[in-house]
Image (cartoon, grey):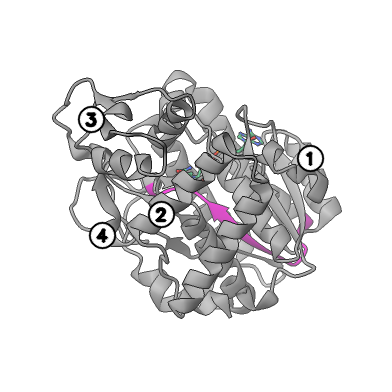
Amino acid sequence: MFKDIYKNKKVLVTGHTGFKGSWLTTWLVKLGAQVVGISKDIPTNPAMFEELNLESKIKHYQEDIRDLPKIIEIVTDEKPDFLFHLAAQPIVSTSYSDPIETISSNVMGTTHVLEALKISNHKCTAVIITSDKAYDNIEQVWGYKEDDKMGGKDIYSGSKGAAELIIKSYFHSYFTKDDCNVRLAIGRAGNVIGGGDWAKDRIVVDCMHAWSKGEVVEIRAPKATRPWQHVLEPLSGYLNLGQALYHNELLHGEGFNFGPRAEQNHTVEELLIDLSKYWDFKDVKDAYKVTGNIPFHEAGLLKLNCDKALFHLKWQASLEYKETIAFTSEWYYDFYKTDKNILDKTLEQIAKYEDMAREKGLKWTE
Ligand SMILES: NC(=O)c1ccc[n+]([C@@H]2O[C@H](COP(=O)([O-])OP(=O)(O)OC[C@H]3O[C@@H](n4cnc5c(N)ncnc54)[C@H](O)[C@@H]3O)[C@@H](O)[C@H]2O)c1
């Protein structure tokens, strides 16, 4: 996998205690990396980081990326070979109630990581994670390309768009110099689903909570359509990007989209029906209740054009919609309803994902 580039390498992951960070940490440990993590807290209860006991497998720093001296100290002391920056305040609704937390973590936090890399200036390959929401959503029906305008009308999107501008200016101001040892690239992906997420205001998380207690979940916008992507898809993209960037200096400073296949677009209602099949409902009516049907204005539907990742990295999404559903529901079902070891379940899903990608001939599986 990834031509063994991560084996015995030191990899720093910020936001390693979160949903995507916990999956990435588990995968990197499986790949033989020495993982060092920086997060300010364990963001949910329960949390995948704790359920998998990841703290025992890595070096864990509980620090805030807004603490510049601390971040400089960790990066200069640890001198990681690779860095994946995921730490952020990622919830749109929280960004409305707490804009300062969101902007300071997402914009200044990213700036601090870049500043620490600049000061340390050791040989490091860095993948900075922003979001599809960094693009200025002009409600076009076709996919956004990497050189489209950055923007964002809500605070979260604005903070990710602003982080992109800062990354670009750091790149041009410091990281293109001859004596610079840092290489960086940007990964942009959309909303993801998968086992181990307990963040608030996410439909799949609400379902799993309710269904684990045999309760009905209430939905208000059943016809809303979203591109449902499993968390392992963008993570394979980030790892693929890190590997390619390490070898190819032409990718330095480039952004890459990692989106789902076009046929992954399904309504919330279709998603719930399909997820509920993995639970013990006699009738799907026991799983969810529609409490209103807001004629949904698809302001949030934002497609990514992933041709650049296909061309430069030979990266493509691996899972079909039905496999995405199976991976997600089975993980939570095993967590809540069986005594199966959930670290084993997670590793089993990563191995299965690797096998499926290998069958599709994806280069990163070599
Ligand atoms: N989950 C998604 O659907 C999605 C979609 C697009 C982009 N992203 C991006 O991916 C990244 C990870 O998202 P997630 O869903 O795993 O989030 P999460 O909320 O599960 O985890 C966030 C992590 O960041 C850490 N963190 C937050 N603020 C921090 C700070 N100031 N200092 C240090 N650590 C801090 C938290 O402790 C946690 O480890 C984020 O950058 C997010 O914007 C996520």
**Secondary structure found at label 4:** helix
What is the CA distance from the residue labelled 1 to the residue labelled 4?
40 Å
Q: Dot 4: within a 10 Å radius of its alpha carbon, few (fewer than 14), some, or many (20 or more) residues? A: few
Between 249 and 95, the one nearer to me in the picture: 95
**Disc 4 designates what residue?**
263
Q: Is residue 114 above or below residue 38?
A: below
> Of label 2 and label 3, which has the lower sequence position?
3
Which of the image's four quarters has the N terminus?
A: bottom right
Q: Is residue 51 above or below residue 29?
A: above
The type of residue carrying mark 1 is Tyr
Q: Which residues are magenta?
A: 120-132
Looking at the rendered structure, which numbered label has been put on residue 324? 2
**Disc 3 designates what residue?**
221
Residue 41, quarter of picture: top right
What is the CA distance from the residue labelled 2 to the residue labelled 3?
21 Å
Cβ–Cβ under 8 Å for marks 3 and 1 = no
The quarter of the picture showing ligand 1: top right
The type of residue carrying mark 3 is Ala
Cβ–Cβ under 8 Å for marks 1 and 4 = no
**Secondary structure found at label 2:** helix
The image shows residue 331 at horizontal and vertical percentages of 53, 46
What is the CA distance from the residue labelled 4 to the residue labelled 2?
12 Å
> Of label 2 and label 1, which has the lower sequence position?
1
